Every structure is written in C-alpha cells, then in structure tokens.
Amino acid sequence: MRGMAAVWKATAIGIACIAGIPASAAAQAKAGVVTTLQGTATVARSTAAQPTPLRFRDDVFVHDHIVTGGSAIVRILLGGRAVVTVRERSALTIHETPTTSTIEIGSGKIALAVARDRMKPGESVQIKTPNAMAGVRGTVVIADVAAPAGGAVTTRFTLLTGIVDVARLDAATGQATGQLVTLRPLQTIAVTGGLPPGAVRALGSHEAQSIADDYKVVLPPPPPPANAQVTEQQIELAVQHSAALTEAEPDAEDGTRAIGDRTASGGDTAAGEAGSDLPRAGSLGATVGAGYGSVGAGGTVTVGGGTLGAGASVAAGGGGITVGAGVGGSATVGGGSGTGSGGGGGLLGGIVPKILR
C-alpha cells in the first residue's frame, strides 16, 4: 500500500508539472489565499531559489515566508476560519499541524481575526513571535513586534474582542513557558526580551479605535476617466429604460398614464420615492429616478440620488457606483463612499470581513 501511495503522489506531482504548476507547490499544503494586496510584498518558499512577488489572489502555502514592503498591506484568508492582515515592513510564516495553525511573525505588525464557530473541535490558532506566544480563542488580536538592532525584542498584544492567553517563549525549546496571562477585550500587554509578560493595561475607546484603524483597508479611488465612462454608461441605460416605459399607449385621453399608485402627465414618468414602481412597469431590474430624481419622456434624465442596477447608484453631484470587490467588501467608483474588503463601521469595520461574520 505504501508503494502504491508513493506512485499516486509521484503521478499527481507529474501531472501538476505538465500543467505548469511547480512540483514544490503541488506537494505543499495550501494554507490560504491573498484577498487584498496594496503596495509590494514577496513570498519565499523553501524549494525556491529566490523570493517572488506576491500577487492578489495568489495561493499561500504552509511554510511560506511573506515579507511586506513600505506602505504595503496584505490580507490573507486562512481556510475560511481566520483572516490575517499584515502591515508594512513585516515578516511572517504560516505553519500548520492537523490541529494547530501558527502565525509566526518575526517583525512588524499583524491583525488576526478568528471565527471560533468555524473551527472544528480540538483546533487552535496561535501567534508566535521571537519572545512570546498567544493562544487565540475566537478573537480579533493585534500583534506588534519591534526588534531594534542590538536591543531586546518587544512584543505587544492588543485584544479587541475575545480572549487571548499570553506567555513568554522559551528560546531554547520554542515553546510557551511560565505563567499564562489572560487578556480580555480592550486590553494590551507587552513582553520584553526574555522577561515575563508585563502588566495588563486597559484601553480607552479612542485608543482602541486608533489602533484598529491602522488595519482597515480602504480601496483607492479610480481615475476620473473611469468615473465618467461608467456614469455615462449608466445614464445611457437609464434613458433606454425610460424610453421603453413611455412606448405604451396613453391610458386616458389627456395623455396621462398611471404607473403604480402615481401618475404623470405632459410626457413625464413619475416613480415612487424609492423607485419601487418602475420594476412593476417592465424595468429590467434597474431602478431609475429614485429618491428625488425624475425621468423625462423627452430623453432628458436627471438623477438625483437614485439607484440604478443591482446594488449600484448614480447620483448627480457626489453619488457613486458601488460594486462588489474582494472578499466581503466593496469598492467605490464615482465619488461615493466605500470601505474596501470587509468594510463597515465601528471598531472592527475593515478588520473582520463579512465572510467571518
């Protein structure tokens, strides 16, 4: 049986090579996927001679060593149960055993969000630094590792939600040692060098929000030509829908035609306040002239805060067209507001993607 298993493994690697996939990657276990990438980052694999650029939607494998450049931010979805956000000038490696996932950070800053309800019984997630370890239990925790040249390494854990057990790391064994210190929400603790963890300090709401904001991803606005092109396309679509609605014969001798519970005369098409009447009149899933806007039968379209298309909006004077982007997030085109991958308000908005909520 062992011989047959070896044959199957060799066959799988051979097929992967024929398909253009390196044998080393085919043999590695996948740990996650890159869902957000801003700036530059590299990934080094044990079987590759040189690090290669990390790209959006790249697979991340166990034992991959990821290094981020200046002003960079990388977000990695780990198995659908955790998300790690890596800030600039950081270095981390992902390790896995059948029951434990370990995020090892040598320097820099990360935020780790773990959905406890998506973990199987007996599974655990931990953060390991050069001098400390944190056991994560359904948590959003931030780890900041400072390693000054010639100085002692300092690790700071900041807990936003959940519970974390922090301990000093034994340099000889690489395992946690000494007394565990349990962090509660909105608490922080530092471990310096080989000393035991320091005193736990409570965070104020403003300080916690400031720390969390460093890990939110805000997608950059697109260039103005892109805004103009998309807006023109949506307005053209609005004209087509309004024309289709006004092709019907008038219901009354005075040229008045009823739409839902509202009527319009003189060649105008009136919609309800939320534009809900238009789909019943034959619109193809788009809502035109919602809010305070109006659609004129003569071909003039004034959009004043209305919505158009699935989840999109066109508004004269500051509105935007919002489309889905990334994992659990949205990008904003045309001047509207948006929140990058995993957007939302509050302390955890932008740190915990919707896929984990």
Image (spheres, helix red, strand yellow):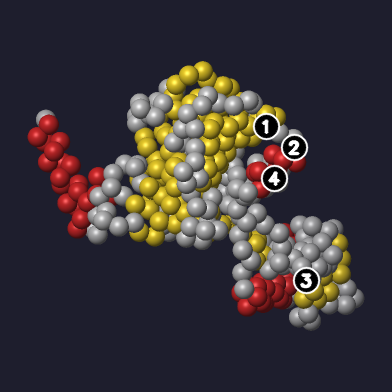
Q: Which residue is mark 3?
A: 316
Measure the C-alpha gap from mark 1 to mark 4.
Answer: 12 Å
Q: Do the CB atoms of the residues marked 1 and 4 lie less than 8 Å apart?
A: no
Measure the C-alpha gap from mark 3 to mark 1.
Answer: 42 Å
Quarter residue 100 falls in: top left
Which numbered marker is on residue 59?
A: none
Mark 3 residue type: Ala
Q: Give how far across and how far down residue 279 sits, in percent.
A: 71, 60
Q: Which residue is mark 2?
A: 205
Which numbered marker is on residue 186?
A: 1
Q: Do the CB atoms of the residues marked 2 and 1 lie less than 8 Å apart?
A: yes
Sequence-wise, which precedes: disc 4 or disc 3? Answer: 4
Closer to viewer: mark 2 or mark 3: 2
Left or right: where 103 falls relative to 188:
left
Q: Decide: few, some or many residues near mark 2? Use Cα within 10 Å; few <14, some 14-19, many ≥20.
A: few
Sequence-wise, which precedes: disc 2 or disc 1? Answer: 1
Local SS, label 4: helix
